[in-house]
Each structure stands twice: as C-alpha cells, then as structure tokens.
Amino acid sequence: MRGIRIICFSVFLILMMLVVYTTQAQIFDDVKSQVKEHTLSNGMKFIVLERHEVPIVSFHIYADVGSAQEVDGITGISHLLEHLAFKGTKVVGTKDYATEAKLLEQTDQLYDQLTHEQNAINPDSEKIKTLQAEFDKANESAHELTVVGEYEDMINKQGASYINAYTGYDATQYIVSLPSNRLEFWMAMESDRFMDPIFREFFEERDVVMEERRLGENRPQGKLYEDFIAVAYKSHPYHHSILGHMSDLRRITRKDVESYFHTYYNPSNLTVAIVGDVKSDEVFKLAETYFSRIPSEPKPEPLRTEEPEQWGERRVSVVAQAQPSLYVGYHRPNIRSNESLAFDGLANILGNGRSSRLYKSLVKEKKIAIDAGASNSFVGDKYPTLFTVYVTPAKDHTTSECLEAIEAEIDKLKVELVTDDELTKFKRQTKKSAIDSIKWNDWTAALLTYNDVILGDWKETYDRIKKIDAVTVADIQSIAQKYLIQKNCTIGEIVSEK
C-alpha cells in the first residue's frame, strides 16, 4: 500500500506541475495577445498594452545608446546627455529663447577659446583671466533667462507619480507614470523634448556629473569595479565606466552633446512602450500627430570593435582603507546566445541567495566570508559580457582563501551535474519573478522596450520564459566546462591598506 501511495503522490505532483505550467503559459499568452505595436514613418516604434484597472499609465522611452557607444575623448557623454535632457526646449525652460540662444552660442565660443589657451604650451595667464571673466559673465546672463526645473515642474503638476531616467552600458531610458487623462500632454511634452532639446545649464550640470565621478573615485568598491572591468575588457568599450573619465568630462562641450544627440537620439533609434489605462488606437493617432514631426535619420551604425579571446588569467588590485573584496569574472556570450538561459541557471545555483552553493559553502559552513554571490551579467547584455562571482571575506580571512573555495565549487560543477532540485528551484524562481514583473505597468513597459531592442522582439517578454524549461543539468555543466576556465578569467580584489 505504501508503494502505491508514493506512486499516486508522484503522479499527483506531476499533474500539479503540468497545471501550474499550463496556467503560467496561458497567462503569458493572454497578455501577449493584448499588446499592439505601430512604427511611424520616421522609424520610431510604439508598443502599447492596455490595462484599465486603474486610471494610470506608464511611459518608457528607450534610447538605443549607452556608454558602449562612446569613444575616447567623450566618455561619460551618454550620462551627461541624460541629465541635460531635462533642461527644456525652445519653449520650455526659457524666458526669452531668442536672446538666450545668442548667449549660449557666445558661451560656447568663449569656452573654446579659454580651454585652447589653458592647454597651450605657453599659456597667457592674463588672457586666461580675461576670457574666464567674459565666459562667466555670458554664462550668468544665459542662466538669468533660464526657468530652472520647468520641465519637471510641468510634469509633476500633471500628477506624475514617478519620473526618472538612467544610463547604462547599452541604453539610456526615460520613464514616467501619469494619470491616463494626461496622455496627450505627455505626447506634446516628450515630442518637443526629443525634437528641439536645448542643453542649457550645460556647465552647471557637467559639474554635477563630475561630482558623481569624484564620489565614485572615493568609494573603494567603485574603484574595484571600474578597474576590474577595465582589465577584463581591453578592446570593447565596455572597458570604460558609465560615468566616463574625468579628463573627458572636463573637455566635453555643448556642441559635442548636440552632435551625439543627433546621431543617437533620432527616431529610428528610439522605442517607446506605453502600458496602462489607454486605448492603443488613440495612442498611435497621437503619436502620428506629435512624434512624426521629428525628421527621420538613418539608424546609427553598429559597433565595430569586438572583444578578442582572452589568452590568460588577468589580475588587478586596488589598495584602499577598506574591507577586502574579491571579484572573479569569466567572459561569456551576449544575452542572445543559445547558452544564455543556462548561464541564468548557473548564476542562480552557484550564487543567488542564501541557499546557493557559494553562500552555503563560504558563509555558512566554512565561515570564511560574510557574503558571496554570482552575477550572470556584470556589465551590459547587448554585447559579450561577464559571468562574475563576488565575495566579501570574513574577519581574519583572506581573498586567497575565498578564491580557493570558489575554484573548488566551480570544479565541482565541471565534474558533477547539478541536482534536479537545484534546477527546479531555478526554474520556479525565474518564472515567479517573470510573473511578478508583468503585474506592474512600469516593469512591463521596461521589459517590452528592452526585449524589443536587445532581443529583437518585444514578444520575447512573454516567450523567453517558456524556454526556461528546456535548460538541462547537462547544459549547465557544459558552460561551466567551456567558459569557467583559468585563461578566460579576470580576478580583482581590494587589498586593505595597512
């Protein structure tokens, strides 16, 4: 009888898993069928998902440009442009644009003359002093014509519940949630912002970004992250930080930003997702009215530089008055690779949470670390990235001890298959996270734009999760054997300053 009960219980579990999987698949298919898309004649794409439960709508503009598009001399310009995109237009943020435009042009010319003289072989101190005074006067006069913060004030007065922007290695994104009866207001404001931006308050905002850079330089973990990435990538532009080099920030000009904007913010390089209490037909009609005014431009050329094969282990250390810390990174393919989902599983099993192998081994059992984890994508996703393990050693223990323990866990992965229970846990957690994400308008909008640009189709927001079930224990062992090898490894550590 006991054997029959076990068999019956096993059959029950299988049936329940089938029901859960079928329900999850149905949820994703049902939502996917409700998504509509429309591309304007200038190349700008709009993706809409109607949700009428509450009168709120989330807007997400995804510019297909991040720090990976920057070249030497203008590193940090993507992030700086993100800040300046809130400074208004010819009609927003100014008291008298005609006069202001002349003053902005004057400040640009004076700044060029000033920096030229400052960098001369034999700089003329008196000339520098005169130019500095003229520049300060022109810049102050331009600032007097600025209505500071008017763009954000106008958005907030319309009931914005969240307004933000962020820059990454692969993208720059602008997000806001508004009452649904403010749809046309958003269309008017955002089309104006991306058609006629004025990068006023340039030097003040550049100083803000430079201060962010200084703060990053004062944080030991920030130093380690920056040097670790710089050593891991010798060719691909992932090797410089999103904040850029301080010397570049000092010399970037307003003309540089304008040129960069026209190259990477043209309509064919912008994707919009709108999720919430709207009608897709009305969205597309208003998009034609407002955004089709922006002239069409060719989509920017893709990056040419690819990171070459690594020939041997690389190491970097940062000496600081800080607790030791350790990064161990391995080059891996981009997210479009057929192996990408197996890397998700590897990161989950090896270093996601307190039940992961690294945490249990290094923190709970050996007690040589106070934290341990793994990241499947340590920089961007669009281009080949890094699978990275990170550890903070416990008091009186070293990074060398932790590195040895990490390598032991990785060696196990290569010779022993992960358990079915570990694989099942990964799949369940991933599906739950995906379901939780699509409950929220703003998260859904972010996923729709991300998947459309990075994976080539917004439908991957709902289809990719189904592919999780195809990942096997053999797939995870295979990528561990193929990529987690010494010659493909970069090690970075914080060494405590005595």
Image (tube, rainbow, N blue to C red):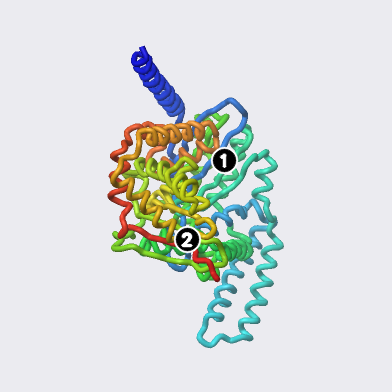
> Is the C terminus in the top left, top right, bottom left or bottom right quadrant?
bottom right
What is the C-alpha distance between the residues marked 1 and 2? 56 Å
Discs 1/2, front: 2
Dot 1 or dot 2, earlier in sequence: 1
Q: Is residue 291 above or below residue 170?
A: above
Mark 1: which amino acid?
Met
In the figure, is residue 53 to the left or right of 4?
right
Q: Position of residue 430 (x, y in %)?
A: 44, 35
Residue corresponding to mark 2: 398
**Any part of residue 466 in sight:** yes
Residue corresponding to mark 1: 187
Q: Say which quarter of the image contains residue 254.
A: bottom right
Mark 2: which amino acid?
Thr
Numbered badge on residue 148: none
Q: Nearest the camera: 142 or 319? A: 319
Q: Position of residue 433 (x, y in %)?
A: 48, 35
Instruction: Tell me what residue is drawn at x 55 percent, y 33 percent.
Output: 440
In the figure, is residue 270 to the left or right of 330?
right
